[in-house]
Each structure stands twice: as C-alpha cells, then as structure tokens.
Image (cartoon, helix red, strand yellow):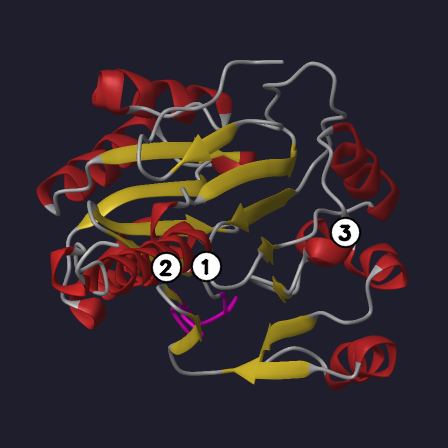
C-alpha cells in the first residue's frame, strides 16, 4: 500500500479548471449579449423616392428612409402612397412590425401620406410630428396609435439620433441627425428651411462636423448660379459627402455629383447605405 504522502496533490487542479470555465462563460455572455450593440452597422434604406435606383421597386413622388441598427428602428417620412410604401417594404424584406419610431419631417402629403396604411400594420410605433402640425392630423394619429410626440425644440429620439426641432418660417420642418464616429449625418425631407441653413444650424447646435447630408434639397426652381452658391457654402462648412434626391431636381443633382465626385452618394429608391462604410449596396 502506497504511503498517503506519496500521492500527488490535485486539489487545486479542479479549482483552476472551474475558474477557467467561469471566465470563459463570462466572456461568452459579454460577446453574445453586449458585443452586437457595438459591432452592428447602422443601415439606411431609401424605401420611397421618385429618383430611381433599384429597378424592382416602384418610384413615386415623395420620400421615406428606414434607419436600422440604432437603439430604435426609425422610419423617416412615409412617402405619399401607403400601398407603394408597403409594397416596396415587402420587396426589400422589411417587416413593418420591426419599426419602433416614425419621424415626419413636415406636413406635406408626399411625406406623410403613407402613414395611415403603415399604422394599420403597426399601431405600436411612436410618431414624432411637429408642434405646428394641424390638430386634426395629430388627433388622427393619436387615435390610431396613441403615441404622438410634438416636436418644437431639438430632441433626442434615441441613442445617437436627434431631431433638429422645428426649423424654417413659412414651412416648418425637422431633419434627422445621426451621430457617427465619422461625424454627423443629416437626413432631410425637403429642406424647405434651406439646406445651407439646416447644415449650419446642425453644426452649431451639436458642435460637430457634418460628414454626410442626404434627402430632398428642394432646389428644382433654383438657377445654376444659385445652386453653385449653395454648393460653395456646403463645401466651406466641410460637408464631406452628399446624397441629394427627391425634390432636388435632375440638373441640380448632377451639379452636386460633379462637385463631390467620389463623395457623391447615389440614394434613389431602394439604395442602402451602411454608416461605417458610406458605400451603397450593389443594386439587386
């Protein structure tokens, strides 16, 4: 019989093994439940627009853009026709029930008309409207979803995303602002207050540079000289990339394309844009 003292002492091995398993479990837990919050790209998809991009989608006058990957999934504007909006969403594989928040830039029907069909599919959303919206409009929205927030001043909509608040005089409008590691991204509906004034306000209010501005710039009636001045002003303010569409005008869009070159982003109907790469997905 062997002496008990000659037996190898192994009492610490199981303890060390248990400790390693606990550490591995903690790392696995952090990776599975917390890493996606930081690693996930923010993707913006133009669902509704009169500027074509994805030929499988229906183009129509208006604007709507889906923002995914933030704390909340946000639909900015709803286009003018609910049937077109929902049909384009279906073709893109977007479930209306995944939308948490709707932000309406201004009262014009080509930006609000699709809301009613959307609310029939998803009445759990929170809808951000301007304080200046007609009372009847707000009452109708509240009746359908019960969650309406009237915006006047700049307001945080979720982590890293804000409304500029009501801007402009004769036609009040709010734009969406997203904070990224490369700078601010501004999404405009029609830019009725003036695209230069919107960018200037955003830079001054948030004290950050503007990396990208896209959406409707409302320049169809502007002369070449006027557009050249606007381009010059945006360049002076350091706007890195642009993606004008909707109500900007074809000739005016071409001027922006020539001015920004490789930093011009094609953002017609169906285009997808990842914030981390700022490159549109290939056409499907």
As drawn, which residue projects farthest toward the left? 236
Mark 1 = which residue?
Answer: 33
Q: Please rate how many residues cluster around mark 3, counting C-alpha atoms within 10 Å: few if below 14, some from 14 to 19, many from 20.
A: some
Mark pair 1, 3: CA separation: 25 Å
Q: Is residue 267 magenta?
A: no
Of the residues under marks 3 and 2, which one precedes in the sequence? 2
* Marks 2 & 1, CB-CB < 8 Å contact: yes
- In the image, taking residue 168 as reference, residue 115 lies left or right, namely right
Residue 131 makes an appearance in the image:
no
Mark 3 = which residue?
Answer: 96
Q: Please rate how many residues cluster around mark 1, counting C-alpha atoms within 10 Å: few if below 14, some from 14 to 19, many from 20.
A: few
Q: Nearer the viewer, mark 3 or mark 2?
A: 2
Q: Please rate how many residues cluster around mark 2, counting C-alpha atoms within 10 Å: few if below 14, some from 14 to 19, many from 20.
A: few
Q: Nearer the viewer, mark 1 or mark 3?
A: 1
Percent position (x, y) of residue 246? 56, 36
Mark 2 = which residue?
Answer: 30
Q: Which residues are magenta?
A: 162-173
Percent position (x, y) of residue 88? 76, 33
Label 2: which secondary element? helix
Relative to 116, is 149 above or below? below
């Amino acid at each position: 019989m062997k002496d008990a003292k000659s037996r190898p002492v192994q009492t610490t091995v199981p303890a060390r093994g248990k400790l390693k398993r606990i550490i591995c479990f903690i790392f696995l837990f952090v990776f599975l439940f917390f890493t996606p919050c930081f690693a996930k790209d923010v993707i913006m998809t133009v669902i509704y627009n009169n500027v074509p991009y994805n030929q499988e989608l229906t183009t129509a006058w208006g604007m709507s853009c889906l923002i995914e990957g933030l704390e909340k999934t946000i639909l900015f504007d709803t286009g003018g026709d609910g049937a077109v909006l929902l049909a384009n969403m279906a073709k893109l594989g977007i479930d209306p029930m995944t939308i948490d928040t709707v932000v309406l830039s201004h009262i014009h029907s080509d930006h609000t008309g699709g809301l009613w069909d959307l609310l029939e599919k998803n009445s759990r959303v929170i809808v951000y409207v301007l304080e200046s919206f007609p009372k009847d409009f707000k009452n109708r929205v509240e009746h359908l979803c019960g969650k309406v927030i009237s915006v006047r001043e700049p307001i945080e909509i979720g982590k890293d995303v804000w409304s500029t608040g009501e801007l402009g005089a004769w036609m009040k409008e709010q734009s969406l602002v997203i904070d990224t590691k490369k700078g601010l991204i501004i999404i405009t509906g029609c830019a009725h207050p003036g695209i230069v004034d919107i960018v200037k306000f955003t830079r001054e209010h948030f004290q950050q540079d503007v990396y990208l501005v896209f959406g409707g710039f409302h320049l169809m009636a502007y002369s070449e000289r006027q557009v050249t001045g606007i381009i010059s002003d945006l360049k002076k303010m350091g706007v890195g990339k642009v993606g004008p569409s909707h109500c900007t005008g074809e000739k005016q869009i071409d001027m922006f394309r020539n001015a920004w070159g490789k930093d011009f982003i094609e953002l017609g109907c169906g285009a997808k844009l990842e914030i981390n790469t700022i490159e549109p997905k290939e056409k499907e």
